[in-house]
Image (spheres, rainbow, N blue to C red):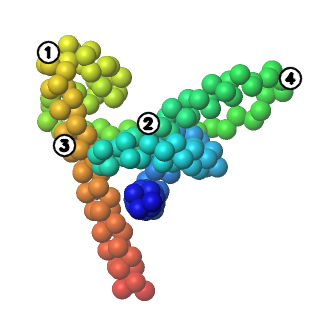
Amino acid sequence: MATSGGKVLDFEEYVRTRQDALLRSARRLVPDPVDAQDLLQTALVRTYGRWDGIADKSLADAYLRRVMINTRTEWWRARKLEEVPTEQLPDASVDDGTEQRADRALLMDILSVLAPKQRSVVVLRHWEQMSTEETAAALGMSTGTVKSTLHRALARLRQELVNREADARVLERDDQERERCAA
């Protein structure tokens, strides 16, 4: 019983500390805020059952994002089957792409902190969606080297994001303090 309780507390603590970041990830996957919340909740339920199997809890975010991507794909396939032709088209909303460009700019900027070899592995594996074997062949390295390089590169990118978020919070606090002093 204690292990089960420990598992619950561990998972609950993880969700409590990471829910905002995970919800932002869900929002990037589906445009509707309610669907994003549903997506995250579904992914959390699916992950809870496998929580003990995630040996390296530092990779839990990546695991959950993969579950969200797979779930979104399942939903998309199910909705595709439910589509029915109509005589009147729905109003088309126009997405100006600002958020997407900002994400892309951040990604390009963050990739610059990686060594060239790490950057190449990340781009080929995640951007170009090559398999580990294809990446190894393209870069002339072993699959083990690709895996270890990718692991170190992703850890470095995660740390850079954490650092930037912390810097942004400090800047925001400084701005608020300046506004209070000016008032």
Q: Up-down: is 148 above or below 20? A: above
Which callout, 4 or 2, points to the residue nearer the camera? 2
CB under 8 Å between callouts 4 and 3?
A: no
Q: Which residue is drawn at 35% across and 43% down?
A: 54
Query: Which residue is at the front of the view, 166 or 101?
Result: 166
The answer to whether residue 26 is visible is no
Dot label at residue 140: 1
Query: What's the distance in space between the residues labelled 4 and 2, CA to CA?
Result: 37 Å
Query: What's the distance in space between the residues labelled 2 and 3, CA to CA?
Result: 24 Å
CB under 8 Å between callouts 4 and 1?
A: no
Q: Which amino acid does label 1 sit on?
A: Gly
Neighbourhood count class around disc 1 (C-alpha, 10 Å): few under 14, some 14–19, many 20 upward: few
Dot label at residue 113: 3
Q: What residue type is labelled 2?
A: Arg
Dot label at residue 87: 4
Neighbourhood count class around disc 3 (C-alpha, 10 Å): few under 14, some 14–19, many 20 upward: some
Which callout, 2 or 3, points to the residue nearer the camera? 2
Q: What residue type is labelled 3?
A: Val
Q: Disc 4 or 2, which lies upstream in sequence?
A: 2
**Whole-percent x and y of residue 64?**
44, 43
**Whole-percent x and y of residue 12?**
46, 60
Q: Disc 4 or 1, which lies upstream in sequence?
A: 4
